[in-house]
Image (spheres, grey):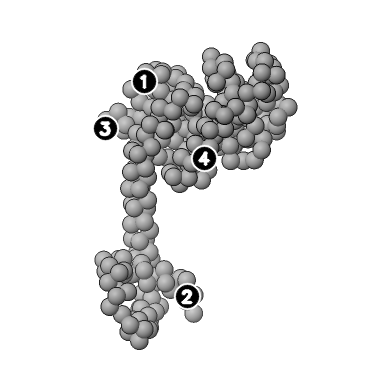
Amino acid sequence: MLSKTFFSACLIAIITFLNIPISFAKKTMNDTERKEVESVVQEFIMKNPEVIMRAIQSYQIKLEAEKQKKIKKELASLNTKLNQNPGSPVVGNPNGDITIVEFFDYRCGYCKRVFPAIQELLKKDGNIRYVLKELPILGPDSVFASQAALAVWNTNPEKYLSFHAALMTSRGKLNKEKVLKIASDLALDTKALGKNINNKSVIEELNMNMQLSERLSISGTPAFIVGDQLSPGALSLEELKQMVALARER
């Protein structure tokens, strides 16, 4: 026996597959007619499962297309906050012809895995402006690391990249003590750093990044934005190059 949820999904998929407006189906069926249709559809499902799979796939493709359309619209409306917000660290070429935005967490294993590819990309392509969006989603230690990094950006921007790289390449626990030890090793004033961690600008930046991620349906890290392209996950160097090349073509 088909579950009610699965049956409903199949019915929606079939309606979509046959290009019948759902609103039309709802308006033109009474309860008796709906039961008759459901009976016919259920029998059809049992006899032709391959058609249902095609219908569901078609429905999934349609949903994904709608999602991508929405994301592109959001990227356009959020362009300034994503690319030009003064509270967001910028590395690479500040005048580059292409801007890459990365959402990341210092305790994210995938972010650490992709970090060498990012460094290689910036080394090989000197015309990329790279915007870093701190998105600490993996707990209090992640939040502290991001706050510390933003405090460094605000007070010693020339040392931000070194601090960022040290945090990204660290292994094991990345707790408060370790973050401060890294800062000390880079000759940063840890007392001043501690005072600036909770600055209004730091908190506002983290809150804004969280809001941006929600509007763009970014649920994990890393996530990369290049022009109107949004790609989640630990991309390879070649995939990053392809995104840049496509953006330049446009």
Q: Nearer the viewer, mark 4 or mark 2?
A: 4
Residue that mark 1 sits on: 96
- Asked if residue 11 is positioned above or below residue 107 in the image, the reply reads below
Residue at 37%, 34% in the rendered image: 79
Residue at 42%, 40% in the rendered image: 231
Q: Secondary structure at mark 3?
A: loop
Residue 47 in the image, given as x and y percentages of width and height: 37, 78
Residue 69 in the image, given as x and y percentages of width and height: 33, 48
Q: Quadrant of the C terminus?
A: top left
- Asked if residue 9 is positioned above or below residue 168 in the image, the reply reads below
Along the line of sight, which residue is nearer the eye, 33 or 215? 215
- Say whether residue 250 is left or right of residue 140: left
Q: Nearer the viewer, mark 4 or mark 3?
A: 4
Between the residue at mark 1 and the residue at mark 2, the CA separation in whole angstroms equals 54 Å
Residue 213 in the image, given as x and y percentages of width and height: 48, 41
The answer to whether residue 243 shows anywhere in this view is: no
Amino acid bearing label 1: Gly
Residue at 31%, 80% in the rendered image: 29
Q: Earlier in the sequence, mark 4 or mark 2?
A: 2
Between the residue at mark 3 and the residue at mark 2, the CA separation in whole angstroms equals 46 Å
Along the line of sight, which residue is nearer the eye, 40 or 4? 4
Residue that mark 2 sits on: 4
Between the residue at mark 3 and the residue at mark 1, the CA separation in whole angstroms equals 15 Å
- Asked if residue 71 is positioned above or below residue 162 in the image, the reply reads below
Q: Nearer the viewer, mark 1 or mark 4?
A: 4
Residue that mark 4 sits on: 210
Q: Secondary structure at mark 2?
A: helix
- Kindly check if marks 3 and 2 are in contact, taking CB atoms under 8 A apart as contact: no
Amino acid bearing label 3: Arg
Amino acid bearing label 4: Met
